[in-house]
Image (cartoon, grey):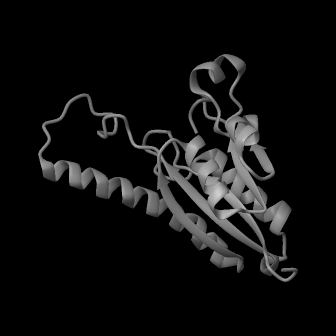
Amino acid sequence: MENEPTRVMVAVNESTIKGYPHASISSKKAFEWTLKKIVRSNTSGFKLLLLHAQVQDEDGFDDMDSIYASPDDFRQMRERNKAKGLHLLEFFVKKCHEIGVGCEAWIRKGDPTEVICHEVRRVRPDFLVVGSRGLGPFQKVFVGTVSEFCVKHAECPVIIIKRTAEESPQDPADD
């Protein structure tokens, strides 16, 4: 057991900023912090477990007000959502391979709080790293925070990485 790498789960998600099809500011910051402060140059001592909890749009139509849908439209939407998730994980896996740190990456659909805590129970990482948008108390009431939920309910130590004011978009709920 001593020679096994430390398994660090990093929860990642897509940016909520329109026209920004990349990793969210918070998850990218959590990932980069993990590499810089935890892994450092000891790449063989760690294995990153990259989990993308993919939230389905309520209506599945990505900000469209109305649409005439055929069964084919729904198949294409599912494929597009899957491709977006794979593109996101590809970004993180590529970075891991560039520096030589082992990793696994996967997608689970559903509420991020439930998905992350379920996957922590299933995979049993040594600890979990999540990003935080830094919402104020008023916004937390309406939006809620995945990071706070994970601290209370994940069955492993949790490290929350906050983004700086300079990294925050105009609307702090955006990420």
In which quadrant of the rendered view does residue 80 lie? bottom left
* Residue at image coords 21%, 49%: 74
Picture layout, residue 114 above or below residue 33 = above
Residue 106 pos. (x, y %): 52, 64
Residue 57 in the figure: left or right of residue 174: left
* Residue at image coords 57%, 43%: 114
Residue 103 in the figure: left or right of residue 111: right
* Residue at image coords 72%, 59%: 32
* Residue at image coords 71%, 76%: 101
Image quadrant occupied by the N terminus: bottom right
Q: Residue furthest right?
A: 2
Residue 132 pos. (x, y %): 70, 40
Which of these two is toward me, 122 or 26?
122
In which quadrant of the rendered view does residue 65 lie? top left
Q: Residue furthest top?
A: 138
Residue 127 pos. (x, y %): 78, 57
State how many labels appear: 0
Residue 168 pos. (x, y %): 66, 36
Image quadrant occupied by the C terminus: top right
Residue 55 in the figure: left or right of residue 74: right
